[in-house]
Amino acid sequence: MRPHHDSRPTLRSSDLRWGIERRLEFIELRLFWEGRLNRSDLTRAFGISAMQASADLRRYDAMAPGNARYDRNAKCFVRSTRFAPRLVNPDSASYLHQLSALAEGVLSASESWLRQVPSYDKVSLPCRPVDAHVLRAVLDAVHTRSALHLHYQSMAHPEPRWRWIAPHALGLDGAHWYARAFCHRDQRFKDFRLSRVVAVGNSRADSTLPGPDRDWDTLVTLRIGVHSALSAGQQQVIARDHGLENGERVLTTRLALLPYLLKRLNLDIGSVLRAPQEHPIVLLNREEIASLMGDVDHG
């Protein structure tokens, strides 16, 4: 890439077609995370010609002059010491998300913008499959505001039961997908785990909803902090682990999802704090959250 000249016109990403912008972001991410790329990386990733790849590299140089230089020995472009992101804001979450997707098989190597990846693996949790036909039926009911007849296995009864539900949203607790729906059998809004749907029956127009889903519509604010019994060094590392600023972090969730979040974060709403090494994060607004938990209506 040529050295920067002040007279060179500056291109804006907003002036580019989406496909070109996506390729330029690919160039920048590859330079940031792996420090090098060549034309073949672009041709393989996007199915473009070598001529188009060269044009993209020149265009990137115009937008981010000095970010890369051509290494004749390595026969590729390498990240320069002056590199500064111009098009994207690289963050570790996006990189680790790519690794996670690769590990799960959700993303193929050809679809990832990663090329040189470290040796990696992840803890494999039990599979919680959701039948595609079940999901499609629930989505259709949400979009058309219809009721759906489900054969559902709950943990409250030994055998599955047929019931009419009117789903209006989907929820994820970190491991399971739920349909948030009004249950005509129980006459209240509940969560229905999609993996526990045994069969799907008919659907029908539904105009019998009692009103809005209060638990779903209500937003709750949690303030988390570090257990005061930890040492100063332990408090610092826990604060960094959980992204605390000035000793706390504010999380917002729906009231309907509050029990799942508390369980996932291992947060205690009891009046007595538990062992700090096992529960290093505490709720700073514990009394407020405890009172709200008594109001949550779950399936």
Image (cartoon, rainbow, N blue to C red):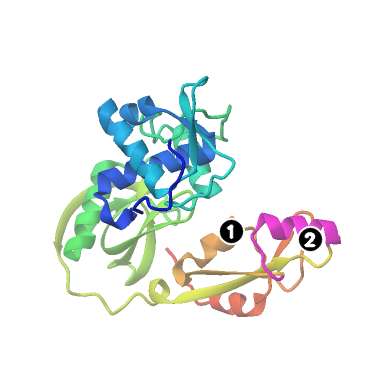
Q: Nearer the viewer, residue 24 or 101?
A: 24
Specify whether residue 276 is in view: no
1 vs 2, front mark: 2
Q: Position of residue 121 (x, y in %)?
A: 56, 31
Image coordinates of residue 160 in percent, x first then y, are: 34, 50
280 horizontally vs 169: left or right: right
Disc 1 target residue: 263
Amino acid type at image mark 1: Lys
- Of the residues under marks 1 and 2, which one precedes in the sequence? 2
Please state which amino acid type lies under the numbered disc 2: Gln
Judge left or right: residue 11 versus residue 255.
left
The vertical placement of 126 against 217, above or below, is above
Q: Is residue 281 left or right of residue 194?
A: right
Task: Name the disc covering residue 183, or none.
Answer: none
Q: Secondary structure at mark 1?
A: helix
Badge 2 crowding class, 10 Å Cα cut-off, few under 14, some 14 to 19, many 20 or more, is: some
Whether the magenta-drawn stretch holds residue 142 is answered as no
Label 2: which residue? 235
Let me know if residue 238 is in the magenta part.
yes
52 in relation to 4, above or below: above
Q: CA distance from mark 1 to mark 2?
A: 21 Å
Please give the name of the residue rendered at 38% of the width and 52% of the height, measured from the top-left corner.
7
Residue 55, picture quadrant: top left
Q: Which residues are magenta?
A: 230-246
Q: Residue at x 73, y 74 (%)?
A: 271
The answer to whether mark 1 and mark 2 are in CB contact below 8 A is no
Q: Quadrant of residue 191?
A: bottom left
Q: Position of residue 157 (x, y in %)?
A: 41, 54
Residue 128 lies in quadrant: top left
Q: Is 134 rendered above or below residue 49?
A: below
